[in-house]
Image (cartoon, helix red, strand yellow):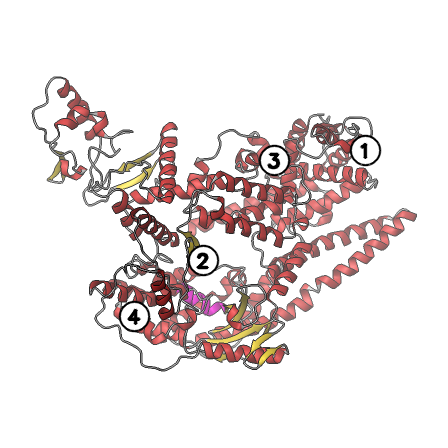
């Protein structure tokens, strides 16, 4: 469990046990056995040292409850008060462990521990188990429910699925495939360096479910200094011999339902959970293979290749369909879908393809070893079946699988190219509809209609209509229905909105411009989820949604703005069209809309012959350019050798093309269509301009030529360097969605920077920060605010529910109310501070933050202010709604307990106890400052050593 790593003795325990293990044999065998022994040692340590947290939680709860009952009758003595505090301290520590354990089990990586909720994680675990549970299955002899029989059916089905059938296959002779160079072949087989191994380790997701060895990569990273020597020896051994010991490449096969209520194993998606040692090896091999894929894979394949995107193919197909519609040409699309594509890959064919592509013998031997040593055990309701070997297929979950499948797919690409070259593959003219039915019968396929789904996106539809987006809206709603919103704080909801919900439509938004009607519907779904509304009950939206989407640094919550994200994503197409990197999609667009023009001359205009998709992309691209120029920066060419830049038509000498700046000279030019490289020559390593005119320049034209010369002489032409398209708003000149999203943000700040720093201080959980944000914006549900919004049930009574004197509004509740004042005085006494409290929440925040931080640790002062305000609000709500009174002393105790827990969670490594935090907070502050100084010094020394 990841939570073990928080124990101060766990690292030394792992180090001692690993070094004490004596295992003989090959390096791979030693690593495998030592990991197995270490798992047993960790289980024993968990039982004897870490403790059973659930049992201990129950004991502590009972002891505190007994003391609480006693305190209602008599006053507790000093020892009992101290014991109660110690119980609370241990409970907070156990609570942190419980939340971390349930978080890991729930696999919800989007939420932070500081804002965790055990009940939420507990519900997620049970929901996932219920969804993936297999209560019965349709086998060869009918319906089976007995667990042992279900396991037998699973082994039978999947062992047959992965068994290679021996039959004579056609040979792809006479087909040319791209080949890697000799240097690339040798580089692929280089020895593995320590740096390469560590880079591969860091790129592995530490929280993914473990394989049969029981380890996730969080543990491997945590204990890397201990494991490093043995792991490096394993890699050296594999490079030399290319062998994997039995059991090292074993994996669990987890079955994920493809649809609701599956009844057959073919309705489950098999995902392999692979052991960490093999997975690290596969990751490093995949990292090497990725770097040569661009030279091997045809541009008709757009997935998993650097510089290409899956959505490229969808754009191409949409443009082809649009072209056919405009021509009113009868056509049909043949859509081939690979059934169980990974599971059916023949290893011999894969090896033959690698041989055709020039891979070396050693590399091919490594890949064959990774495939042939595969052993699988199927997980049925968490229990593994017996293990069996496989004879074909690639495992989903293996880092190598997507890349190896691309190599196999090149076989089909090669056949299509060969058939096209020999005239065997061409368009078919459609006659009667009956012909289509006959063709479908022969090919054993279905007849589809427009629009249809291709690679997860629609083709042939009208993106401006709401009907086009129905599936996205349904997924939005269904995803929300699956989450237990009532168990999530505002901080958790923000994280969920950004990392899960806003990501759902991203694939659509990467190609299609979202219409306003759909955008409004999506925003409503997000807004209702955030504020807690349902279809039957509408909650108050206390802050405008566009303000919630403002970046945190400017006083918002940083929730993803879907319209802004849509523009940023579509703008990338516009930049990619001009960035010089080739691609099939670019050739299609260039030929269809910009045929006959120079590459540097792209005028973005909307025309009737443009498809709706490309017209929207053009509109966004031109809008981005106009906005960039309004702000004094824009897109421009960075001149290299001048081979891609149209001399007269492109914007490279300023904000306008030269033909617009110097129209008289343009009229005299003998090379109006020329590129920049055509307007001069190299002489002894120096570029010399040589613009040719129809006649000599004199008079006004001569004056214009002088200004013209001044501009072009400022430009440095670079030999043997490509021209590049640059965006001035990017830090490195290259368009990125992240920077474009920030560029499109509104420019008005909702809150001053100093209040933003308090709200998002390091130590506060996100739910407390959101509370602080609403506090500073005066958007809490006070009686005064409710009355202003017309909440009739208050009957006009806006008096304070605690003291009954003032108006129930922010400044009174947190500054003027006697109950709040007593709490603040207790807090000041705790920190040894004195002063007059302000009646203004902003002045009070500044006073408390500066007083506690002493100008040296602003995060701590802000944190204490926020948590005190949090509990003042909590105390007020308890009294108003539950009529429960809490003394200032009890509130202080809650503040001390919670602040200690949250502080220790965020400031790991600082050493002070709960008692020290309660009795000497200033000394604890100094300890945090000293700890940070030591960390800074350590990192400086590490940098110097590096």
* Dot placed on the residue nearer the N-terminal end, 2 or 1: 2
Compute the Cα span from label 4 to label 3.
60 Å
Q: Nearer the viewer, residue 757 or 673?
A: 673
Q: Picture coordinates of residue 215 (x, y %)?
A: 54, 67
Observer-nearest of 408 and 708 = 408
Tell me how far mark 2 sits from mark 1, CA to CA.
54 Å
Q: Cα distance, mark 2 to mark 3?
A: 33 Å
User: In the rendered image, which residue does mark 3 sit on?
Assistant: 758
Q: Is residue 913 left or right of residue 881?
A: left
Q: Which residue is mark 1?
A: 802
Circle 4 residues within 10 Å: few <14, some 14–19, many ≥20? many
Quarter of the view holding residue 846: top right
Q: Residue at x 64, y 68 (%)?
A: 45
Residues rendered magenta in the picture: 275-284
Closer to viewer: mark 4 or mark 3: 4
What residue is shown with label 4? Answer: 353
| Vertical arrangement, residue 414 with respect to residue 849, above or below | below
Residue 768 appears at what percent x and percent y?
A: 65, 41
Q: Earlier in the sequence, mark 2 or mark 4?
A: 2
**Residue 76 placement, left or right of 386:** right
**Which image quadrant is residue 191 in?**
bottom left
Tag 4 and tag 1, C-beta contact below 8 Å = no
Crowding near the residue tagged with mark 1, few <14, some 14–19, many ≥20 C-alpha atoms within 10 Å: many
The kind of secondary structure element at disc 1 is loop
Quadrant of image for the N terminus: bottom right
Q: Earlier in the sequence, mark 2 or mark 3?
A: 2
Residue shown at 70%/28% (left/top)? Answer: 788
Tell me whether circle 1 and circle 3 mark residues in contact (CB < 8 Å): no
The disc, 4 or 3, on the residue closer to the chain's N-terminal end is: 4
């Amino acid at each position: 469990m990841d939570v073990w790593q928080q124990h101060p003795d766990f690292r030394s325990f792992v180090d001692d046990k690993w070094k004490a293990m004596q295992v003989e044999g090959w390096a791979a065998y030693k690593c495998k056995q030592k990991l197995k022994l270490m798992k047993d040692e960790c289980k024993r340590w968990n039982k004897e040292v870490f403790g059973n947290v659930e049992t201990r939680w129950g004991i502590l709860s009972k002891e505190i409850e007994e003391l609480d009952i006693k305190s209602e009758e008599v006053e507790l003595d000093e020892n009992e008060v101290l014991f109660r505090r110690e119980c609370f301290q241990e409970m907070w520590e156990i609570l942190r462990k419980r939340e971390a354990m349930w978080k890991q089990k729930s696999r919800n990586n989007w939420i932070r521990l500081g804002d965790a909720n055990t009940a939420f994680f507990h519900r997620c675990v049970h929901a996932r188990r219920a969804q993936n549970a297999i209560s019965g299955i349709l086998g060869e002899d009918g319906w089976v429910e007995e667990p042992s029989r279900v396991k037998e059916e699973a082994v039978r089905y999947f062992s047959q699925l992965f068994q290679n059938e021996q039959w004579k296959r056609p040979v792809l002779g006479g087909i040319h495939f791209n080949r890697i160079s000799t240097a690339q072949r040798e580089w692929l087989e280089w020895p593995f360096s320590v740096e390469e191994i560590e880079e591969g380790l860091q790129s592995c997701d530490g929280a993914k479910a473990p394989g049969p060895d029981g380890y996730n990569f969080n543990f491997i990273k945590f204990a890397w200094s201990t494991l490093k020597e043995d792991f490096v020896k394993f890699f050296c051994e594999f490079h030399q011999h290319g062998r994997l010991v039995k059991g090292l490449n074993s994996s669990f096969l987890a079955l994920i339902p493809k649809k609701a209520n599956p009844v057959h194993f073919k309705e489950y998606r098999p995902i392999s959970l692979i052991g960490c040692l093999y997975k690290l090896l596969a990751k490093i091999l995949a990292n090497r293979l990725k770097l040569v894929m661009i030279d091997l894979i045809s541009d008709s394949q757009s997935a998993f290749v650097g510089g290409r995107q899956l959505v490229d193919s969808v754009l191409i197909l949409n443009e082809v369909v649009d072209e056919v519609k405009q021509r009113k040409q009868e056509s049909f699309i043949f859509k081939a879908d690979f059934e169980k594509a990974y599971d059916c890959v023949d290893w011999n064919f894969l090896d033959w393809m690698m041989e055709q592509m020039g891979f070396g013998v050693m590399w091919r031997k490594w890949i064959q070893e990774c495939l042939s040593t595969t052993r699988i055990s199927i997980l049925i309701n968490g229990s593994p079946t017996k293990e069996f070997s496989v004879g074909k297929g690639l495992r989903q979950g293996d880092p190598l699988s997507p890349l190896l499948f691309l190599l196999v797919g090149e076989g089909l690409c090669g056949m299509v190219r060969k058939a096209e070259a020999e005239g065997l593959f061409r368009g078919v003219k459609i006659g009667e509809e009956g012909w289509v039915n006959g063709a479908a019968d022969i090919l054993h396929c279905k007849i589809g209609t427009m629009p249809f789904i291709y690679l997860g996106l629609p083709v042939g539809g009208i993106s401006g209509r709401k009907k086009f987006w129905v599936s996205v809206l349904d997924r939005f709603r269904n995803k929300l229905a699956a989450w237990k919103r009532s168990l999530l704080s505002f901080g958790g909801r923000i994280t969920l909105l950004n990392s899960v919900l806003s990501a759902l439509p991203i694939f659509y938004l990467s190609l299609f411009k979202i219409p306003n009607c759909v955008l409004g519907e999506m925003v409503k779904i997000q807004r209702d989820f955030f504020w807690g509304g349902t279809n039957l009950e509408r909650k108050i939206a206390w802050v405008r949604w566009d303000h919630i989407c403002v970046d945190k640094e400017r006083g918002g919550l940083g929730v993803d703005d879907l319209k802004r994200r849509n523009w940023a994503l579509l703008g990338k197409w516009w930049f990619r069209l001009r960035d010089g990197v080739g691609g099939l999609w670019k050739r299609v667009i260039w030929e269809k809309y910009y045929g006959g023009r120079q590459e540097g001359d792209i005028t973005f205009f909307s025309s009737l012959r443009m498809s709706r998709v490309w017209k929207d992309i053009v509109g966004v691209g031109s809008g981005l350019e106009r906005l960039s120029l309004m702000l004094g920066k824009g897109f421009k060419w960075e001149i290299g050798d001048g081979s891609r830049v149209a001399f007269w038509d492109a914007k490279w000498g300023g904000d306008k093309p030269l033909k617009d700046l110097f129209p008289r000279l343009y009229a005299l030019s003998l090379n109006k269509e020329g590129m920049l490289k055509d307007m001069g020559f190299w002489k002894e390593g120096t570029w010399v301009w040589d613009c040719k005119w129809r006649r000599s320049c004199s008079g006004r034209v001569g004056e214009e030529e002088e200004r013209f010369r001044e501009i072009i002489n400022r430009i440095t032409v670079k030999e043997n360097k490509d021209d590049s398209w640059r965006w001035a708003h990017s830090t490195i000149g290259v368009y990125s969605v992240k920077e474009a999203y920030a560029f499109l943000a509104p420019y008005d700040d909702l809150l001053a920077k100093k209040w933003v720093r308090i709200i998002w201080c390091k130590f506060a959980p996100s739910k407390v920060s959101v509370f602080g944000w609403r506090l500073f914006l005066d958007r809490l549900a006070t009686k005064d605010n409710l009355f202003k919004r017309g909440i009739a049930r208050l009957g006009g009574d806006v008096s304070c529910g605690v003291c009954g004197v003032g108006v129930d509004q922010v400044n009174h509740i947190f500054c003027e109310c006697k109950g709040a004042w007593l709490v603040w005085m207790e807090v000041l006494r705790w920190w040894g501070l004195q002063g007059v409290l302000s009646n203004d929440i902003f002045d009070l925040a500044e006073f408390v933050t500066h007083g506690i931080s002493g100008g040296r640790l602003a995060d701590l002062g802000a944190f204490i202010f926020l948590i005190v305000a949090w509990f003042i609000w909590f105390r007020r709500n308890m009294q108003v709604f539950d009529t429960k009174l809490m003394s200032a002393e009890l509130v202080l105790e809650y503040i001390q307990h919670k602040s200690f827990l949250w502080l220790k969670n965020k400031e790991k490594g600082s050493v002070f106890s709960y008692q020290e935090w309660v009795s000497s907070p200033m000394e604890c502050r100094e300890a945090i400052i000293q700890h940070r100084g030591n960390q800074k010094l350590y990192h400086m020394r590490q940098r110097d050593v590096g």
